[in-house]
Amino acid sequence: MINIIEIKARSVEQDKIRQIIQSHECDFKGIDRQVDTYFKVFNGRLKLREGSLENYLVQYSRTDQSGPKLSEVTLCSYDPQSNLKNILSAACGILTVVDKKREIYFIDNVKFHLDIVEELGTFVEIEAIDEDGTRGQELLHEQCQHYLDLFGIEKQDLIAVSYSDLLLEKQQMRNAG
């Protein structure tokens, strides 16, 4: 299991944030079109990520709160040519699907996503990652806060929930209206 302290925020200043990231010896991983299929599960969240750079089955638990929050994540690589999606769809049922274009950067152990999410808009994610338990949550929180301040992200722009939750809320509003 990997511990991650993360934030998600609405962002209309993608260019500004990209310039700040690129001005710090970053490792640009590329641009990935990712389709995340969320499955109906009883504990946490389960999604299958299909992309050109990242293909994972991801199980995670996280509290829904604005600002830096702890995620406990288990990743499993899979062969995109496999029938894993069909198996999970049949066994669990599909909750929702998130389609996005994602720019991926790293500065040391901190991962940055500049996202354009279909139906939702533009976002930035900051993930301070502790893969082996040596960094500790306090340092991860400090790293997230540092980049929140550096990017000038305001509290009102912070998102407490996942893209899947935002999409489900939007679908419920459409169905109710």
Image (cartoon, helix red, strand yellow):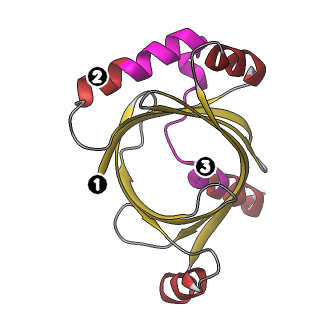
How far apart are labels 2 and 1 at the CA level?
Answer: 18 Å
Tell me the quarter of the picture where residue 95 sits: bottom right
Of circles 1 and 3, the one toward us is 1
As drawn, is 69 to the left or to the right of 29? left
Residue that carries the numbered disc 3 in the rendered image:
163
Residue that carries the numbered disc 2 in the rendered image:
139
Q: Which residue is at 44% across, 13% downward?
A: 146
Say whether marks 2 and 1 touch (CB < 8 Å): no
Kind of residue sitting beneath label 1: Met
Image position of 6 with respect to 151: above or below: below
Kind of residue sitting beneath label 3: Tyr
Report helix, strand or loop for mark 1: loop
Q: In the drawing, what numbered circle is on residue 1?
A: 1
Kind of residue sitting beneath label 2: Leu
Decide: few, some or many residues near mark 3? Use Cα within 10 Å; few <14, some 14-19, many ≥20. many
Say whether marks 1 and 3 touch (CB < 8 Å): no
Start-end of magenta stretch: 143-167
How far apart are labels 1 and 3 at the CA level?
Answer: 22 Å
* 151 part of magenta stretch: yes
Q: Which residue is at 70% across, 52% downward?
A: 170
For this rendering, which residue is in front, 26 or 152? Answer: 26
Name the main secondary structure of what is drawn in magenta: helix
